[in-house]
Image: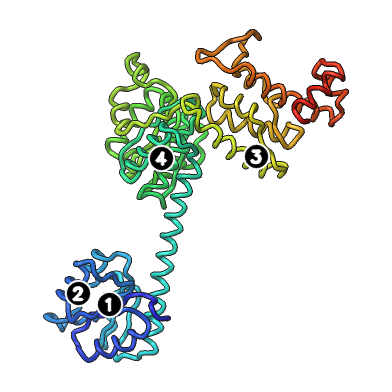
Amino acid sequence: MTAGSGALLIVDDDPELRRQISLFFRRHCEVETASGREEARRLLANGAFDPDVALVDMHLPPHLDSVEEGIGILQEIAALRPRTVRIAMSGDPERSAGFHAVAAGAYDFFAKPIDTRELEIIVRRAFERRRLADEIQRQREDHGRRHRFDSFIGESAAMQRVLATISKVAESNASVLIQGESGTGKELVARALHAHSKRADGPFVAVNCSAIPDALVESELFGHEKGSFTGAIDRRVGRFEQADGGTLFLDELGTLNAAAQAKLLRVLETRAFERVGGKESIQVDIRVIAATNQDLDRDTSEGKFREDLLYRIRVVSLVLPPLRERREDIPALVAHYLALAVKDHDGRGRRLSPAALEALIAHRWKGNVRELRHVIESLVLLADGETIELADLPPQVVSALPGASRDGGLAIPEEGFRLEEYLARHERDLLRGALQKAGGVKTQAARLLGVNKDRMKYLCRKHEL
């Protein structure tokens, strides 16, 4: 151990032994002592002292002939300072004191009389255990922060509201219904809720309800016993059992049939079920998060979805905005997916021209973030130059620009736009795109643009190309 390596609590009724151990360890760490249970409790309860390691005698007054007081102190330390590593010691020749100490949660046991060299080794190991536990916790928290900020990109008010809701409800066990269009990131939100919950160390089990045939829904969710139906050649553990101690994510919840909805409601109420063909009641400890791109309120009014199930699953409602309602986040999303695509594919640096980025921002993105990511990946694979130009974009994206309409005519947006600036900007991008496709040969680029060579020379001088 080194100086300042931590804090040590010594609990022993022998003042000379306390002094001896204290003097030895003060060279290495902060030390506080207590003569018994009450003094130790006061020391810990006021919050002024937070020991990394506690060294506790098992035989203390008023019950010197038993380990009652020692066990009580070990348990109280666990309650007041759960991360403190506890070491028990005893001069009892019987080995039972050590067994009782370990059963009460002690990390290690030391037999008196004191051998400072041996004790130093035990205490040093305890400090190392505490440091390791702290490091694991720090890494887990860092992972949680990275998960949050790396997964959710954008500073728009709409996304900030989503993040605020996640922060508020993540640590609860409340069921959450995530609603949003396809591609808005519903599973990403579900994983974030799990990662920031007390169940983060447990499993996260995702189920796409729309991909399960109606006849197999109950087997998929709740499992089945061998021979329960044709083809059931072995026992199957269902998704609810797989998620025990963690989170079950039911994607596309609205596609479940009526029978599956009824059984799901009962399981959510009781947290118990039977496998298909089984008689044993299986209890699970899970949190259920569901997602849908359907209007479940409308489906409920039309009799397609159970109203009581909707109330049970929608304890917390979280609505994800479509990408067209948070266009200010698109540049950051584009940069993120561009870097990912470059890393995954050719490794060449890529950037977007201002006109290309404007087109991406203007597009309505019916497929939302998922569609945007696929378009960026396609551009990295197919674009010829390091700069992705307007001409490289898919036609459906370019058509969203001001001045373009679905029938090929002109459509002026309500807010209008500056024609000269628009023409100049896109003229330059079209020139650069043509030159890249022509390998820098201006006569070929002029042919691609339908202009003569003199006009091409003039345009290149105008735009310094």
Can the viewer see residue 211?
no
Residue pictured at 13% horizontal, 80% vertical: 63
Name the amino acid, label 3: Ala
For residue 246, above or below residue 189: below
Q: Which mark is residue 394?
A: none
Of the numbered discs 2 and 3, the one sitting upstream in the chain is 2
Of the numbered discs 3 and 4, the one sitting upstream in the chain is 4
Label 1 neighbour load within 10 Å: few <14, some 14-19, many 20+: many
Residues under labels 1 and 2: Cα distance? Answer: 8 Å
**What residue sits right under mark 3 in the picture?**
341
Find residue 101 and report its image quarter.
bottom left
Picture coordinates of residue 320, whole percent (x, y): 42, 30
Of the numbered discs 1 and 4, the one sitting upstream in the chain is 1
Residues under labels 2 and 3: Cα distance? Answer: 58 Å
Picture coordinates of residue 95, whole percent (x, y): 29, 83
Q: Nearer the viewer, mark 2 or mark 4?
A: 2
**What residue sits right under mark 2 in the picture?**
40
Name the amino acid, label 1: Leu
Q: Is residue 219 left or right of residue 303?
A: right
Label 2 neighbour load within 10 Å: few <14, some 14-19, many 20+: many
Q: Is residue 92 left or right of residue 145?
A: left
Picture coordinates of residue 251, whole percent (x, y): 45, 32
Residues under labels 1 and 3: Cα distance? Answer: 54 Å
Q: Nearer the viewer, mark 1 or mark 4?
A: 1
Q: Which mark is residue 9?
A: 1
Of the numbered discs 2 and 4, the one sitting upstream in the chain is 2
Q: Is residue 154 left or right of residue 445?
A: left
Q: Is residue 263 left or right of residue 212?
A: left
Of residues 287 and 230, which is closer to you in this image? 287
